[in-house]
Image (cartoon, rainbow, N blue to C red):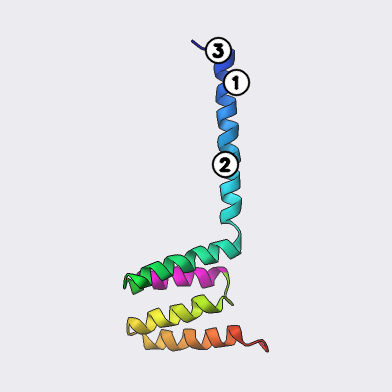
Amino acid sequence: MLYPMEKLMRTKLTLSCAAIVLTLTASCSRDPQKVKLQYAIAGDKSAAKGDYAEAIIQYRKAVAVDSRFGPARFKLAEAYERTGDLRNALREYVRERRSSDPSG
């Protein structure tokens, strides 16, 4: 049986540990480099399954984080092409090319 003070201390310790874990998790997920890669990986997985609609969503999220993320733009263009959306595919191919051009 725990005394009220011991119970209070355990509760505070548990809450403190939970707060630390949540803070560390949140800080990692806010790193734009990691976030864009997570979206790109999710897009790759969806594309590998043939779910190009979901791949498009994930690649668009990746380029929303970093508009100059060329590999995600290229894969987004491919996904659009596979769904028959050639207008958006062409637009993304052009954007990808511009994002990889060092002259701007």
Which of the two discs, 1 and 3, labels the residue nearer the N terminus?
3
| SS type, badge 1 | helix
Q: Distance between the residues labelled 1 and 3?
A: 9 Å
At mark 2, the secondary structure is: helix
Q: Residue 9 carries which label?
A: 1
Marks 2/1: CA–CA distance: 18 Å
Dominant secondary structure of the magenta stretch? helix
Please state which amino acid type lies under the numbered disc 1. Answer: Met
Question: Would you call the spot at circle 1 few (<14 residues within 10 Å), some (14-19), or many (20 or more)?
Answer: few
* 48 is higher (above) or lower (below) than 96: above
* Residue 17 point in image, percent of width and height: 58, 34
Residue 83 in percent (x, y) is at 32, 81
Q: Give the range drawn in magenta.
A: 54-65
Label 2: how many Cα within 10 Å (few below 14, some 14–19, many 20+): few
Residue drawn 46% across the image and 72% down it: 59
Would you say 100 lies left or right of 76 here? Answer: right
60 drawn magenta: yes
Residue at left offset 38%, top offset 81%: 80
Picture quadrant of residue 31: bottom right
Q: Which mark is residue 4?
A: 3
Q: Which residue is tagged 2?
A: 21
> Which of the two labelled residues, at mark 2 and mark 3, occupies the earlier sequence position?
3
Q: At which x and y percent is residue 23?
A: 60, 44
> What residue type is disc 2 on?
Val
Residue at (32%, 70%) from the top-left corner? 49
Q: In this view, does 17 lie above or below 99?
A: above
- In primary-sequence order, the first of circles 2 and 1 is 1
Residue 23 in magenta stretch? no
Labels 1 & 3 near each other (Cβ < 8 A): no
Quarter of the image with the C terminus is: bottom right
